[in-house]
Image (spheres, coloured by chain):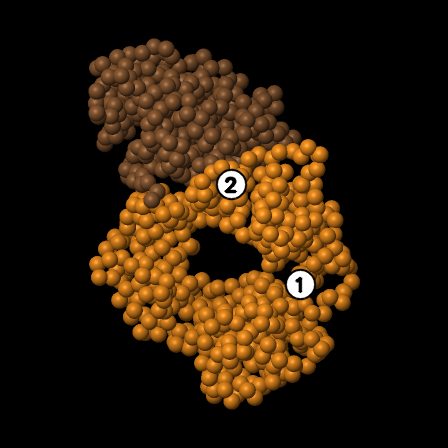
Amino acid sequence: MTDLLQVTESGLYCPAGDFYVDPWRRVPRAVITHAHADHARPGCGRYLCAAPGKLVLRTRIGAASPIDTLRTGESLSINGVRVSLHPAGHLLGSAQVRLEHAGVTWVVSGDYKLQADPTCAGFEPVACDVFVTESTFGLPVYRWQDPAVIAAEIDGWWRANRDAGRTSVLLAYSLGKAQRLAALVDPSIGPIVAHGAVMKMVEAYRASGVRLPPIDRVPPRARRVGDGRALVIAPPSVLGGSWLKLFGASSVAMASGWMLLRGVRRRRGFDRGFVVSDHADFPGLLAAVEATRARRVLVTHGFSDVLARVLRERGLDASVLPTQFVGEAAPDAADPEEDGGGDDDAPGGRGDDVGAAAAPAAEVQAP
Amino acid sequence: MKRFTDLYWRLDACTGTTDKVAALREYFASAPPDDAACALAVLCGARQLRAVSTGQLRHWAAEVTGHQPWLVEESYAHVGDLAETLALLLPDRVPAEDGTDNAAEGLAAVVQRTIRDLRHESDDRKREVVTAVWRRLGARERIVWHKLLTGGCRVGVSRTLVARALAELAGVDPAVMAHRLMGDAATDGAGFSQLLAREPTAADARRPYPFFLAAALESGDVAAVSAALGDVALWQAEWKWDGMRAQLVRRGDDVTLWSRGEELVNEAFPEVVQAARGLPPGTVLDGELLAVRDGRLLGFAALSKRSGRRRVPRKILAEIPCLFVAYDLLEAGGSDLRDRPLAERRRLLEELLPNSFADVLAGGDAARTAADRPHLSPLVSAVSWTDLAAQRAEARHRGVEGLMLKRLAGAYGTGRTRGEWWKWKIEPLEIDAVMLYAQAGHGRRAGLHSDYTLGVWHEGELVTVAKAYSGLSDAEIVEVDRIVRATTLEKHGPVRICRPTLVFQLAFEGVSHSTRHKSKLAVRFPRIVRWRRDKEPAEAGTLDDLKRMIDSGGC
């Protein structure tokens, strides 16, 4: 029996339904798990995404192509394949794609996290026969703390900076992480200011009905901003440019799961690193896999070979799905998945297609 | 333990030297003397005792976490720091029922209980103690404790900064404190209190002076060297021997021989210590330990068989005889000469040491056995920079690394003060080599593939010749890391075998025969000079190119 999904040059393809999931080339019909740049490329004929993510996706791909949506609980038949979308908890409108055909059910997780996030619906496990999972943080050293603990750390840092008259610059991916952080921090400490790339997505979130605290845009031609009290949320691409000089004395922190490692923190030279991720940690990945009750698991995007081996040792039929999603998790890679587009208006910012031209990943199983 | 942990992470977080000195000063001002002495030894990089092996720690961590050993290894390969890997893998801290808190235990007590006392215990007992401490420490403390436990606790501060902090605390000059920190400084609380004394102490008598270090001349070009250094007559030139830097202290009835790592190495070089007894008391020499037999230099590899030993077997003593070649006089008649100009120090040194090392090399053993004193480092005379450059160009045949240039009017400085002492090394040998394997680095380069095994062509195949860790910029390493991941053919634990696509220009000091690499050759001190983006792997060098370098004296 042929698989319901296959890896092709254009991406993950469903031959029975003649459509792609998160294609990396322009294809006639694309089902999108979420709007990050390496999952949602512009230029496809027609898109399908979860209803809450429509505006965000529209902001990313432009006005040209039609976007169909499905609400949770709704399904659609595409050439006989039943397609439904289920919350993945990664960011607003992120979805797991459930496919059912000839009595077999597949679920493609996209990117997901199990932690609560005030800006999007939480991850819902979906029973299936075959589960395609991400593995960005698929090593047991990655275990997240309660987001409330991290929020308190960020607040403490912001408060101390404010009292010392230093602007707090928090670097985070402009779509998803930035909005989640804005919703997590305590807005009574001071004003929240956002970089243009972040602001564009803040507006898309608000238009989609997500409540966020008041956030000011950094004026386009400002020479000096704020008096050292503000929390500035900006994409990492502002590093090394002149944009940060707008704020005078500042403390620069990065919010990312990779900040867990001391070596990465030191190498990147941030004043602070906050360990907060929109991906599942290692126990989260294992819990998600178990909750699907899938017998067969295909692992992609990250420490695929490691997670696949762990799952095999737990008695599952698990293997690596070679995809073009950047090959592998790398703390320093210009990760298009997280650091996606929308940063084009940032000084020294990168375009949407960062890493898109990367050679096909040679994911090789550990011997 | 908590106070030291806080210091460790505070030093880790701050980048400016003023902040680091402040952190150190506050720590030393508040820590109990026993803890302070213990911390000082760690900060100064003193050799640390080990109670458990890293293998045991990994094994026990796998048992405690229930992870397979391979998964612990994968984690380590990614994190690049074993202490941190284990701290992250282990389950969260469980507070003790009786309220005892390991973090509250003083550093000296922790080191005593979990390292010194534990060394002679059974493995079962070690496991019991280690796993018990794990349950009681948070991740931050665990990392620091693991580093102490495995004897690899290095903190990102130089000894100069430690000396500055202690000098501020004691109210003495930083140079005085730097001197006090030499050798086996404070080993306990009483020693630490003495260190902070305002007046000179008895312990000062054995101590060596801080070593003055030379900076490397960036350019080998005669015009550039001449422009930077001025008239050649202002400079003293000597060969840069491939030996082991050392300081010979002859005071009272004592002779002490100190390595640059400030370890006492008397036992490893008994004949050198014996020969120094002929020196008048109150003499301190700076120089180089060299292995020489029958007028021939035996090279650094031979010398390493002597150094680091507590007792040297008679056979090795006979096979690898060593001597001390002195190039500076730091103290004579008990007075510190370091502020006097080199020309004067050199004149006094020549008066003190009648035997030149040049005679040893020229005349075989006769000159050597006659020596009851260390040997004098011969000068290299030159009428011009061009003349000197010509002598340097031939230096590879002499078995030296190049030239040392010292300003005749200069004082003996401390640390690496630029401008007075220069090393003008021989131009390295070079070859274009292809990256074949990559491995993730450690510390700042944790998780980044920054260690490369390189190969050259031989009969249509690429054979490995060197492993190189340095030479690329941080940005280039990130870029190479991405290429490594994209071109991986196989993974063997932390090592990735890559499709050959990258060519690096490799510099090295010499080529010799070896069994370590497939090529049967090894290059000395290999490092990457630059990334040859303009070259395809097919254009890289060959094994025959390297063999020719041996033939032309490159060994």
In space, the residues marked 2 and 1 are separated at their CA atoms by: 39 Å
Q: Which mark is residue B63?
A: 2
Instruction: Determine crowd level at label 1: few under 14, some 14-19, many 20+ residues with C-alpha closer than 10 A.
Output: some
Residue B325 can be seen in this image:
no
Chain letter tied to orange? B
Q: Relative to the observer, which residue lies in front, B184 or B308?
A: B308
Q: Which residue is mark 1?
A: B184
The structure residue drawn at horizontal position 52% and vertical position 23%, both measured from the top left corner, is A182
Disc 2 and disc 1 on one polypeptide chain: yes
Q: Position of residue B212 (x, y in %)?
A: 58, 66
Q: Position of residue B193 (x, y in %)?
A: 76, 56
Chain letter tied to brown? A
Instruction: Identify whether B276 is placed above or below A134.
Output: below
Which chain does tag 1 point to?
A: B
Which corner quadrant holds the C terminus of chain B?
A: bottom left
Residue A278 appears in which quarter of the rendering? top left
